[in-house]
């Protein structure tokens, strides 16, 4: 059968529908995607987004130096269940639950690119609450690297009232503050989630992480970061991105945080950067030669 451009588009749409049947709806990715949640005024997440709760407790994931065994956040520790209805509310010190939140964002200021709402979490009674974005590669080409940036809005601080962590910097505060970012190129297989370790947040950036989410109210800006995928994201297939909020082992109630100002774009291949650099150097040499001749 000879496919025209329109029939190819139909095939892509049908592929998206079939892929979504195994999970939640997804959005087409044509090389860049952005979301500031400004249009999220009700109890539903934007198209392509979903909230999941992972079964477990505040002690499911624990760092070294805690009273329970050290286990890093992952997707295989407990069963995932969809949380289909967001709670629309302003953050408060008592708010917490397994579901997702449509925070009426009081941290957004003119010019910082954030929307007036953020998609948020404050896990309790589970192991973690997860914000997931599903994108289908509609570029027509395989993608090997992405540029990702987003904001982590922190609405509340935690207090030293449940000291299961015995050592600094985790004592009495969120041992896994903010969101840990994961991606998955084989939807439906929770064993294939890959942690973007370079973006794992810490209370203090000086303790080894590059993203600092301090125990204060405010916005942590995660600058554009190139993420090289373990395998190619092939044309027509789905990529899952997940922002993972652990239910804190130490303080209670859990921090109230929101995801905002998300941007995903194709990152140039290293060879492309090399060509651009070589081209730039060549232009500089040509300009210098012409200046000497003049």
Image: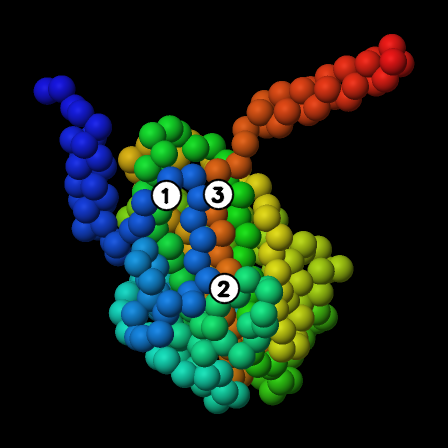
Category of crowding for the residue at label 3, using alpha-carbon neighbours closer than 10 angstroms: few (below 14), some (14–19), many (at least 20): some
Q: Is residue 14 left or right of residue 49?
A: left
Residue at the image point whose x is 62% and y is 52% from the top: 223
* Callout 2: SS: strand
Residue ID at (38%, 40%): 30
Q: Position of residue 287 (x, y in %)?
A: 79, 19
Judged from the image, the secondary structure of the residue bearing numbered disc 1 is: strand
Marks 2/1: CA–CA distance: 19 Å
Q: Quadrant of the C terminus?
A: top right
Tell me if I can see residue 236 in this picture: yes
In the rendered structure, find residue 260 and report the number of the disc placed on it.
2
Q: Is residue 112 left or right of residue 49?
A: right
- For marks 3 and 1, the one nearer the N-term is 1
Q: Residues within 10 Å of mark 1 (few under 14, many from 20)?
A: some
Residue beneath label 3, please? 265
> Residue at point 36% right, 34% down?
139
Query: Relative to 224, is 87 on the left or the right?
Result: left
Q: Which mark is residue 13?
A: none
Examine the rendered structure and indicate whether residue 233 appears above or below residue 148: above
Q: Distance from label 3 to label 1 (Cα)? A: 9 Å
Residue receiving disc 1: 29
Nearer the observer, 16 or 19:
16
Image quarter (top left, top right, bottom left or bottom right) of the N terminus: top left
Report the colour scheme. Answer: rainbow
């Amino acid at each position: 059968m000879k496919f025209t451009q329109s029939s190819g588009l139909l095939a892509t749409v049908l592929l998206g529908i079939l892929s979504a049947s195994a999970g939640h709806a997804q959005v087409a990715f044509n090389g860049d995607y952005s979301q500031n949640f400004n249009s999220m005024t009700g109890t539903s997440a934007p198209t392509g987004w979903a909230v999941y709760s992972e079964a477990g407790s505040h002690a499911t994931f624990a760092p070294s130096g805690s009273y329970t065994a050290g286990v890093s956040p992952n997707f295989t520790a407990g069963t995932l269940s969809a949380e289909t209805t967001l709670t629309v509310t302003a953050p408060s010190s008592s708010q917490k639950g397994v579901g997702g939140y449509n925070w009426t964002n009081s941290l957004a200021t003119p010019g910082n690119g954030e929307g007036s709402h953020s998609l948020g979490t404050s896990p309790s009674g589970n192991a973690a609450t997860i914000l997931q974005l599903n994108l289908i590669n509609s570029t027509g080409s395989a993608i090997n690297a992405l540029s990702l940036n987003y904001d982590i809005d922190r609405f509340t601080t935690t207090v030293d009232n449940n000291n299961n962590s015995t050592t600094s910097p985790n004592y009495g505060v969120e041992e896994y503050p903010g969101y840990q970012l994961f991606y998955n190129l084989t939807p439906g297989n929770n064993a294939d989630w890959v942690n973007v370790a370079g973006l794992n947040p810490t209370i203090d950036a000086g303790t080894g992480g590059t993203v600092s989410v301090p125990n204060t109210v405010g916005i942590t800006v995660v600058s554009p970061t190139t993420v090289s995928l373990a395998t190619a994201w092939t044309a027509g297939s789905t990529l899952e991105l997940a922002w993972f909020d652990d239910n804190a082992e130490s303080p209670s109630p859990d921090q109230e945080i929101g995801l905002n100002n998300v941007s995903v774009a194709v990152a140039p291949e290293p060879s492309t950067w090399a060509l651009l650099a070589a081209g730039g150097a060549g232009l500089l040499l040509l300009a210098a030669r012409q200046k000497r001749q003049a």
